[in-house]
Amino acid sequence: MADDGFSIPKRDPIKSSVGNVAAQRRRQHAVAVGKERRESLVRAKRLCRVGTSGQDDTPLDSGMIIEEEQSILEVQTTSAVEELKSAVAYQGKGALQKRVTALRELRRLLSRSEFPPIQTALGAGAISILVQCLSFGSPDEQLLEAAWCLTNIAAGKPEETKALLPALPLLIAHLGEKSSLPVAEQCAWALGNVAGEGEELRNVLLSQGALQPLARMMLPNKGSTVRTAAWALSNLIKVPNLSPLYNVQNTYTFCIDHSSLERLQESCLPVFPVDCSYGEIWGPDPRAATDLIKVDGVLDAIIRHLKKADDELATEVAWVVVYLSALSNVATSMLLKSDALQLLVERLATASSLQLLIPVLRSLGNLVAGDLHTTFAVLVPGQEITDKVIEVLVKCLKSEHRVLKKEAAWVLSNIAVGSIEYKQLIYSSEALPVLLRLLTTAPFDIRKEVAYVLGNLCVAPGGDGKPNLIVEHLVSLVGRGCLSGFIDLVRSADTEAAKLGLQFMELVLRGMPDGEGPKLVEQEDGIDAMERFQFHENEDLRNMANGLVDKYFGEEYGLDE
């Protein structure tokens, strides 16, 4: 099957039974990103208070308006819609100015509060009259005000956003080259709000051809226009927000020689804890991401903006890269073969804005977790770019921001599933002491990510498909106190974390020299941690824990002493 953006991932994991998980993890991150953005109005939807032309005659409210003021606002809005209908019907002298004045008044009312009177405007018939105002041949001033009104209506509740369906063809049409930049940008803003609502409306926009003209708006060096287009595009190609966040396999799994362990299933923070097919999880056809990266000039524009743009524009472009690299193998490969990786690393090294660091770090992680062969052809141990990647990841691990620590650990865990050279690169870097500290002191979700890194450092692919122990790394990590951190994971209520802990305990029991493993596990109360699974409802955990206790702590344990 041709790779049109949703092919089977190419990553070769350590354990063959865990195969085909890299792209799943990248898409899982994209789902998580989507939910985070949806919960923030400023990222998923944006109320327009200052127009793309720079004008701002809207008085901002200092706080939430009281109920009486809201009632007055609703009455004024109904009156404004009726006045607009009258102005559109008027054909006499000064008709244009009459329409623009009426549009401006409606726009002013729709921009006044955090909860603008959208429903009132819809009930008065605003959409049909605003669509008329978008007709071709209308003056720019009229088009701009009409698009501005629609932008703020689209920032409302789901049913309010869906009311824009009749306006979508004209909004898309005004993205074209014949439109002025302020009009095109305002229409892109409105479409970005529509796309931010959900999968259904995204698919409508894609079917009506919104992708190509939005993509072309990224090509010039017009900061505000590119920023708006990039934001709208990231909303257009992203995965749905209402999806299981962690109900898929993990990309990075360090593996043990234990028959009861098959595949690790993400179980942390399930939004909807049900099993879903790819289509149910990932929503819109990821070919949209592939189509975007194939638009002539888009890749060059992304590289140019990442290199030269200010932080605000680079942030929006980085979010586009997040979704491109999460959803499309084609896009991931093309980005890796460009200067994107180098530029992302440079941004991570120099940026201080958390708003920029998050998408840049996630983009880097997606690229590392993508096309394995291309990734490791770029990240060659001993080369400057590879050392720089580790350096910026250590910076993020040391950050005070929780999300940067977690993302950095995720990226490192993907690097750690590579060859022995990559494991040694991390093992000998400044990352190791930071990871060991985080394993015991960080919040739970970070500790779990860190556990994948440390576990992967201790095993390497074997010739027969089974993992080989890297005894030197295992002995060193255990000697530096990491066993207690893994045993704490075994005691957690999180199924995946418990499996991680049991996996590492098996490595210790099997791999420590001179048979020291059982003693070390016993000293950390590991037997008690495993015995809690004796009658556990999870069959994998029950079989695995009981198997380890029976094998290493059976009737003959301790007799030699």
Image (spheres, helix red, strand yellow):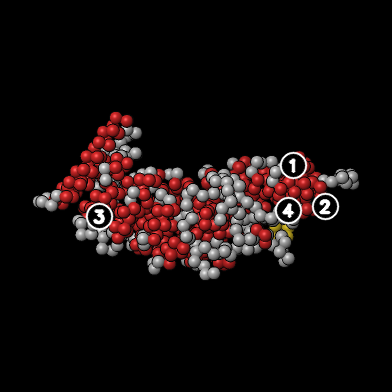
Q: Position of residue 23 (x, y in %)?
A: 56, 59
Q: Report whether 312 appears left or right of 497.
A: left
Please identify, in this view, whether the residue under mark 2 or under mark 3 is nearer the observer: 3
In space, the residues marked 2 and 4 are separated at their CA atoms by 26 Å
Mark sitting earlier along the chain (4/3): 3
Amino acid on which the number 3 mark rests in the picture: Leu
In space, the residues marked 1 and 2 are separated at their CA atoms by 32 Å
Q: Which residue is mark 4?
A: 260
Q: Position of residue 403 (x, y in %)?
A: 52, 46
User: Can you say whether 293 is above or below 39 in the image?
Assistant: below
**Contact flag, marks 1 and 2 (Cβ < 8 Å):** no
How many marks do you count on the picture?
Answer: 4
x 26%, y 50%: residue: 128
Please identify, in this view, whether the residue under mark 2 or under mark 4 is nearer the observer: 4
Mark 4 surroundings: few (<14), some (14-19) or many (≥20) residues within 10 A: some
Amino acid on which the number 2 mark rests in the picture: Asp
Q: Which residue is mark 3?
A: 134
Amino acid on which the number 1 mark rests in the picture: Phe
x 27%, y 55%: residue: 182
Q: Which residue is mark 2?
A: 514
User: Can you say whether 217 is above or below 554 in the image?
Assistant: below
